[in-house]
Structures are given as C-alpha cells and as structure tokens.
Image (cartoon, rainbow, N blue to C red):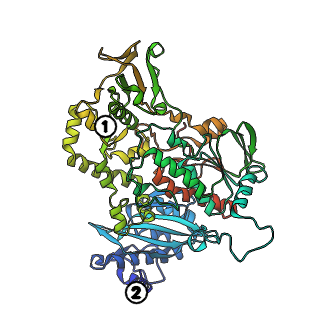
Amino acid sequence: MSASLAQTDRVAADELLVTEPGRVALPPGEPHDDALPVWNDWVRHSPDHVVAAWLSRFEQLLSTGHIEAAVELFLPDSFWRDILAFTWNLHTAEGQDAIRDMLRTCLGSVKPKAWQANGPSREVEDIIEATFDFETEVGRGTGVLRLKDGRCWTLLTTLVELKGHEEAIRHRRPIGLAADAYRPGRESWGERRKRHAEEIGVTRQPYCLVVGAGLWGLALGARLKQLNVSTLLIDRLERPSDVWRNRYDTLVTNSPSAADHLPYMPYPDNWPAFPSKDQIANWLDCYASIMELDIWCKTDCRRAVFDEARDEWIVDVVRDGQAVTLRPKQLVFATGFFGPPHVPEFPGAANFAGEQIHSASFQTAHAYRGRQCVVIGADVSGHDIAAALWEAGADVTVVQRSPVIIVPRESLLGLFQELFSDTAVDRGMTPEKADLLLASLPFRVLSRQHAKMFAEIKQRDSEFYRKLEESGFQLTDGEDHAGLLPQLYRRGAGYYVDVGASKLIINGSIKLRSRVGIECITEHGVLLSDGTELPADVIIYATGYDRSKIPAWKILPDEVRHAVGKLWGYGSGFRGDPGPWEGELRNVWKPTQQRGLWFGAGGFLHSRFYSRVLALQIKAREVGIPTQVYRIPETHCRD
C-alpha cells in the first residue's frame, strides 16, 4: 500500500466507526471503555479501507490502554493467535474474555505500534482477509487479519525479527573476504572455517546445542547462524541426510516441493514435484555445507542435566568413541516426537519360521520376489511397502486392524493449490506469505474448514471411495470428520496419501484382510480372529512407533520428563491426543516447564516457519531481552 493511501485510510478510520444507537460515540483520540465500535455501512467501503480503518482504531485503542474498547473490536467467538509478539509464547486466545486477559497481562511491556496493511486485502464471501506489519518495543512483526461484519474474527500476530539483532541476510549479508582488507597473516575462508570447526565444543562452548541434525536440526541451525548464535548440532548418524537415505528405496515425499524447501535456499525450478528420499538426502547434505553449519556426526548424546547454579546444561556425549562434556545454555531436541519402532507382541511370533521385520528396517523389495508377504498395518508405510513388494513380484496381503484416512494425492494438492504451487507463485504468492496464512488458522477453525474440504473431496472422489470400501478397506474421516491435516497434528499417524497403492487394493493386486484381529503368529503364517491362516514367508510390521519413548526421554532425568509432559497434539480429546484443550501443539517450538529446554518437530513446512520462531526465542535470551512468557500450559498428560 502506498504512503498516500495509508494516510488517507488512517484519516478515514474515525469516519467509518460509529456506535450502536443510544451509546456514547468514540471521539478521535479519546476512546471510552463503555462504547462498542461497530461499522457504519462498512460494506460500501473497499476492503482495503475497512482493513486500514480497523488497524488504525486498534492501534489507537492499544496505544492509549483502552483494553475494553479494543476487545469490542473482536467478535464474541473470535480468535487471536500470537506467536511471540505479545506473549513470548505460541498462544491462541479464544473469545473476548481470553483476549482481554492476554492484553491486560501483556500490553504494557509490548508497546505495539505502526500497524499497517502490507498489501491488498482479499474478500471471500463475508470475510475480508489482509496481511499487515507492526512493531513492538523489541521487534518487528507481521500478521493476518480476518474481518467479518466489520469486526475481527481471527487475528495472527507473529514476531519476525528483533531490533538490533536482525538476520544477516540480503542488505545485511556479510561482506566476505574483502579485497581491500589485505594484511599479513590474514586467514582465508577455508582456514577460518577449519579453525572455527575445531574450536566449537572443544575450546569454545556453544550457546545452543541441537541434538539431531536431520530436517529440523538443519533448519534451526541455519536460522541461528544468521542470528549469530553459537550453535553446535550433533547426530548419531554418519551424515545429516542418513535419516532419509536409510529408508526404503521407493519413498518419495507426499507434499509438493513447492511447499517443502528449507529456509534461505529454495529448490531449483527444475526440482521434481515429489522428490525421492535420496534426492532429499543429497539436498540436506548440500544444505548443511552451504549453510556452514557446525555438526558433529557419529556423536551419541548420553545424558543431559540442567545446572541450576550456572544456568546451563551439562551434556555428556560420545564422539567417535571419545567422551565429551558440553555446557550449552540452551538445549534443543530436534529428534521428532516418535520413539523406537513399535512391534506388537503376538503369541507365537518367536516360533515363526520366516523373516519378521519392522517397516523402519525395510529398505528394498527386490529380495522378496516370488515370496508370500504379509504386511500388518495400513498407514503410509504399510501402503508404500505393499506397493513396492507387488512391483517386485511378491505375493502381498495387507492386514488392516483399524480405520485409516485416505486422500488421493491430486485432491490433497488441490487443498493447498492457492498457497503452495507453481500456480500460486505465478500469482504472486511467496512461500513466506503462504506460511503466514497457514499459521494464521487456529486449530478450531482449521478443523471446521478441513471438515468442509474433506466432505467436498469425498463427494468429488466418491467413485474412488466407493470402490475402496467395496474392497473391504475400512475408511474414516477422523473423529472430527476433518480429514488428514488435523489428524496429523493430533497423532501424526492413521492416514495415507494415495499415490497408487489404494488402486492396487481396489483391483486386487494387493490383497486385503480387514475387520479381523490377529490371534497369533504360527510357524508358517498369521492366524486371524476369523480362523483364517495367511501363509507367509515374510511378516512386515508397519505398526508405527512408540511415542512414549522418544529419544529425549532416554537422555533427560525423569523429573524433567514428568515436568514437560507430552509432545505434539493440541488436546482435542480424540485418540492419541488426550485433553484438556490447549489450542496449540504441546511443547514444540515454544518454552517448556524446564528452563533452557526446547523441542523441534514436524515436516518441511513446520521446519521452515517455526525454526525462525524458536531461533528468535533463543536469540532473545542470549542477548538479555526480557521474555516474560504468558501462560506456559500446565502438564496435564505425560508421555
């Protein structure tokens, strides 16, 4: 928006605001708490003017401390999701009472100002949507506003940089080895990089230690690097990429590459829409090198204890067989929210004459040509492995023990077409704005919207779903009927994005047994609860992972584990996600009940957006910026 238009809109704000009949007006500059602002024929004004007027009045009320009047700018059933800017937390205030409490607690120290729309607004049905910028006492932020009947329905405010501690990118990028800086003994880039790598963790302690150098660890390491935070990543594997490289050979991403790139380094335009696991692995190795991250591979983290007296962690690791003790101020576990493979204890399994493996150990189907294979489990891995076995010439039967959410990949892509696609890019959508819009949806709104979207998918793909059910497959919409994405946030399991395996089940190429239990494993097969025995040379357990035994819990003391509680899930009360309702994912990307302890988890989308969120919190603590956290959730459920 141009400066002249912004000035015009700010002048127009008070002209658009009146009060309900019989109530006291709000004179410009002198708001009253007992007046309720509403819009006077707001539909006749352009969406841009309506947004500018709302932001102007909101800023005016906040700057003068008129909290009651500010709250009345929100609908009774509104949502304000704040990411650091007001709360130094990830917090969603639901309804006017919650918004009032948040403002009363946080407004005095935040001192928000300069609320300004940063582009044209969009009107869809009865909703006006706009993005905006603003400032606080310590940083700069951006956000998303959605207005309904002139009042706020959803508001997102998120901190994006700290004043005086901005990322070293673009106009602030480092000079490098300047040609005019010749001096005797000057180090080359390679010499300086080598010295730095040799010092960190040995003669110089990192401020932040990140355990896990996979997708999330690399993204966070890159963010912290640009904020000049001394950071060391450690990983038990030989290369950062091996968590991908060591998986089954037919694995590809389910989400498109338009949505999956890491911070600062988008994929080239010729990158496949759905890269293979080896392409992702190669990219991660390149990313770690280009981002100049300090990584100790083949390093096992054994123990981590917080030293209260020195306000730092004592972390014992074994690096290439050598015991090393590190003392970071901040400790991040970027090892995900899944633990070791879960293998059900079926009677008779010890007497099975064939081969039994978990899907985590499955790498290639070529060795199983002509063999009878039973795959237990029908989530992502179960489908992918069954399809790979069929391709290799094996005889495959899938045993489905519980209903699964299935979404055809083409339909899933349609859900995100406006945000993450080449078409979206052509229309001017940047990954940064797409991330922001996705983050702006509170979980209650997300579930409602996706319930509508999933109903539309089921109607559009009704023939596909009909044939799949006729094959015997047990389908579900999810307990909230909202489909895949809310299920991902609740459990991270129980779904499959169909890239062809469902069609193989429909046409009988992959055999299916469902609505049966497993009585026992016999010497030569699997005995089902209906008395049928499936002959098997190989049993593959696609039965997921034990979330109660995530890697961090083996390293941290029990009292820390109990204080922190469960990771992931937002308290929906559905399977795998016990209540009470929290409205934000538990203990990831935000402060926990243990000072200096953080967790990173999620996929590409999460790592790109929330790595900055976590990095800003760590940087603020490093430089001494006050970070009074609003409402760290109580520990209601424990892993």
Location of residue 575 (image quadrant): top left
The residue that appears at 44% across and 78% down in the rendered structure is 56
Give the vertical position of 73 relative to 356 (above or below): below
* Residue indicated by mark 1: 501
Residue at position x 41%, y 47% in the image:
253
| 323 up-or-down from 10: above or below | above
Which badge, 1 or 2, comes first in the chain's sequence? 2
Q: Are marks 1 and 2 in contact (CB under 8 Å)?
A: no
| Residue found 27% across the figure and 79% down from its top | 44
Residue 217: give x, y in percent of width and height.
58, 50
Q: Given the current orientation, which residue lies at the most extreme right position?
A: 184
Q: Is mark 1 on a helix, strand or loop?
A: helix
Q: Is residue 432 above or below residue 349?
A: below
Residue type beneath disc 1 = Ala
Can residue 510 be seen here? The reply is: yes
Whether residue 472 is situated above or below residue 463 in the rendered picture: above
Residue 324 location, quadrant? top right
Label at residue 8? 2
Q: Is residue 306 left or right of residue 416?
A: right
